[in-house]
Amino acid sequence: MAHRPHIYAPEIWNNPHPFYAALRREAPVSQVEPGGMWAVTRYEDVLYVLKNPQLFSSEGFRSAVQPAWLEQRNPVIDSILMMDPPTHTRLRSLITRTFSAPGVARLEPSIRASAESIVADMLARRRVDFVESMALVLPSRAMGALLGLDASLAPRFKNWADAVTGVGILPAEATERRAELVAFLDDMKHHLTGVLALRQREPGNDVVSDLLQVRAQGGVLSDDELMGFLVLLLVAGLETTYDLLGLCGLILADNPDLWARLKKDRTLVPRFIEEVLRFESPSQSTIRTTTQETELGGVKLPKGATVLVQFVSANRDESVYQDAHRFDMDRTGVPSLAFGQGIHFCVGAPLARLEVRLALEVLLERCDRLVREPGPVTWNVAVTTRGPAVLPMEVHPA
């Protein structure tokens, strides 16, 4: 049997696009490591998987985050991310209102104020790690406020998110890191359980109170489902936004012409964000399992096959996007699959877009330019998300 490529190997992960371009051409549905998953790389096939949940179940995602060695339950397996209808439908309807565009608009003043204070701090220091000082801080504060978590806990959120998404891809020999991630999972559950208990006694203006109110009014929510919601919101609200912000910072620092154009006309910021989402896909992939033997892209998949749905590849499919490997914020036509599609379309997409837009608007207003330290980018590695891990740069005041 031919050697199967390992998609988390540095030579692929650090620059995935040539690898996936080759797969789209030569083997659009093919097995990869880890675990012999079937990578689906063409836009049309990815869309087919996402739109047919009866053939491609989300419950298979659970094995990716609940490895055999993990003795406790990873709470994200009780979230809507890993559920099929009808349970998925019932639970998703409970939070759709909170995360609708009007629902997140009420958060705009506090997120903008947060972005202002972050940028002021960056300018005071001049030399910063953009990821540490902006990309991580803004989503952490927003999610903390949304979930009613104490602001002092925000620095821990990244560790919690890493634990939830990272346990599934740890090599067997990484025993120290395993112990670390288990401790982070315990810490997260401890604090979220505390918030649930507090909001039961004293409701506030946050998602936890909204969910408890839904339960009190007869919305069927088990304790595990409640915890699954909070963990998913925390992780999804952090990981993708964190990576998207980091990617925006990287692309603006490396392309002064784009920076100049946005500085001149800030109404273009949303278009810039959409092209970053397509071009680099912070949410790289999602996982499904076949419920029966099925054919996809001319390949027969057995029942129970793990399917890796590659947004990172679909969003650069040359048959869908003209000049797919060029960053072009004037693109029109087919929207990217950056936030998925179908019943699992990312519920937090309006919030992520809002946070990143506000961050960029404040940066463009207050800064003259961003200058990145030369050198290769270090990328973080998680099961399904990808973005810069560190971005040392100098921030010049306007």
Image: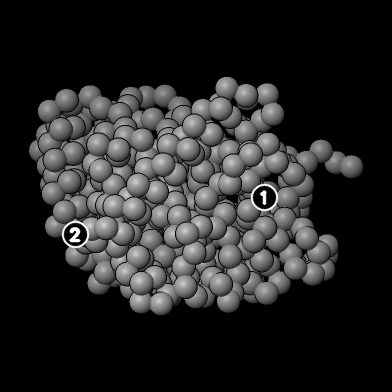
Residue found at x 34% / y 53% = 197
Disc 2 residue type? Glu
Is residue 190 toward the left or the right of residue 75 in the image? left
Mark-to-mark CA distance, 1 and 2: 37 Å
Q: On the image, numbered disc 1 is attached to which residue?
A: 63
Is residue 351 toward the left or the right of residue 106 in the image? right
x and y, in percent, of residue 321 in the image: 51, 63
x and y, in percent, of residue 11 in the image: 62, 32
Question: Considering the numbered disc 2 on the image, is that residue within a helix, a strand or a loop?
Answer: helix
x and y, in percent, of residue 138 in the image: 26, 44
Viewer-nearest of labels 1 and 2? Answer: 1
Q: Quadrant of residue 232?
A: bottom left
Q: Quadrant of residue 259?
A: top left
Is 93 or 51 nearer to us in this picture? 93
**Quadrant assignment for the C terminus:** top left
Residue found at x 66% / y 30% = 171
For residue 108, the mark is 2
Q: Quadrant of residue 383?
A: top right
Residue found at x 46% / y 29% = 378
